[in-house]
Amino acid sequence: MTQDSELRIAVIGAGPAGVYSSDIFLRQLAKLGDELGLGTDARIDLFEKLPVPFGLVRYGVAPDHPSIKFIASALEKTLDNPNIHLYADVEFGKDVTLEDLLERYDAILFATGAIKDKPLMIPGADLDGVYGAARFVEWYDGYPTGVREWPLEAERVAVIGGGNVAMDVARELMRNADDLRAKTDIPDNVYEGIKNNKAKELHLFIRRGVAQAKFSVQELREMEKLPGVQLIIDEDDFELDDDTVEEAGKDKLTRQMVEELFVIRDMAEDMEDDGDVDFEGNPADRKYYIHFNSAPTEILGEDGKAVGIRVERTETGADGKMHRTGEFTDYPVEAVYHAIGYKPESVPGIAYDEGGAHLANANGDGRITVDSENGEIRERLYATGWAKRGPVGLIGSTKSDALMIVTAMLEDLAQNKENARLAPDRDPESIDRLLAERDVRPIDFAGWKRVDAYERAEGAKEGREHKKVIDPDQFRALAHGE
């Protein structure tokens, strides 16, 4: 292979979307490259603004998800590919610009994900004690630039949301600290915070009905096994009409979710009948209320602090359409967490579609456009994952996105196969020289492995598989062998 013959691809973001796309690009090029007249050689440089890779898997999902370590392991194996070069601790728009990359890469793929909350647009959302889920997730996941302490003084809390993030937040607020540390990689500050958490009563509010929630079965099963927690439901929420049952049965995942929710209903009844116990029959010291058809309309406050939440009863038809009833109930709570969706980040030099909450791209196919109104394609620029479609879907959707956008990239390169190597600077070391000139020290895959080895060693001291490093400066020192 020569530096002139290989395709050069830059990927921005080393989370699942970026890593999957890198892997699929190399696989599809090996499979189709000769047929398309592109050859089969490529170098992919993967830029990540954080000091470590894996994005959402490391910093966006609750630490007690048993499947996470398997996903992280698969992503790590992909990064071990000699044709993929990790440049962590390099921020696009600050350390490198779009012009820098267009000079050196034939195509640029944005897989920048989402780390910001959608705003809660109800009165009282700005009161003290009202928190977006994203910041709380950053805290318990040890995000490098996140806060190190979290106020967990409220004895009664509310969580707003009908998806998996809401479930994660609620579960961590109800967790036993010792149980969590024994099974996860949480750092010491998170353990101490959860150990001192005063929450004794939690209300989860879901606007629509049992059949319209967006929980995964895995999330529900994790809810079922919380030591010291009694689950409490309203039996009326589970009175589903025939049309709703029929509609839910058409989709396999929805049907499985509804079936698991009915398991939870039966568990909750047994917990009450057995004297307010947890799933193992032990006395419960925390209560977890699950409210369907409940739309929060206002956070109630006194002296600038949250003291309650007003909720309107709703009705949801088989078609999923929600109707308000005008029936309101106030619940006393001292903290409110809203998990109503993330908002993908904007990217310097790339138009943003505010309505869809993603980078502007052509009909959702991932080809970056001039703006959300003007569908004119900007050649050589692409988006995948949440940056392409907004904050919906799970890991499976990210893989599907990766295959779609890689197909589009190869199609575009093949149309110009005689001159597909569009970047004028073909020297693979050019990007390293540029970063060195700017005093930017990227962390490569070997550097990440040094951090990982340290985390494993620290975990082993406590009988754990892993224990997270959270200080960015410590990351850098470990990665650079200092």
Image (cartoon, helix red, strand yellow):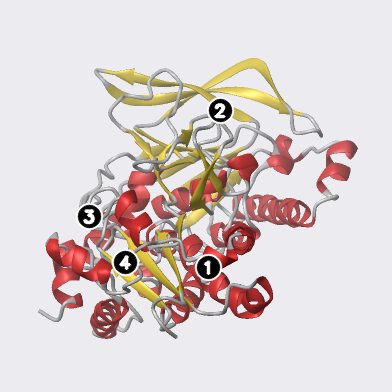
The vertical placement of 87 against 390, above or below, is below
* Residue position for label 1: 20
Callout in the foreground (2, 4): 2
- Left-right relation of 306 to 168: left
The vertical placement of 376 against 465, above or below, is above
Q: Amino acid at mark 1?
A: Tyr
Q: Amino acid at mark 3?
A: Asp
Callout in the foreground (1, 3): 3
Q: Position of residue 290 (x, y in %)?
A: 58, 42
* Residue position for label 3: 95
Badge 2 density bin: few <14, some 14–19, many ≥20, Cα 10 Å: few
Q: Can see residue 94?
A: yes
Q: Can see residue 280?
A: no
Q: Amino acid at mark 2?
A: Glu
Q: Position of residue 286 (x, y in %)?
A: 44, 50
* Residue position for label 4: 186
Local SS, label 2: loop
- Left-right relation of 281 to 46: right
Label whose residue precedes the other's in the sequence (2 or 3): 3
> Dividing the image into 4 quarters, which one contains the N terminus?
bottom left
Q: How far apart in space, not on screen, are marks 1 and 3 (Cα)? A: 24 Å
Circle on res. 373: 2
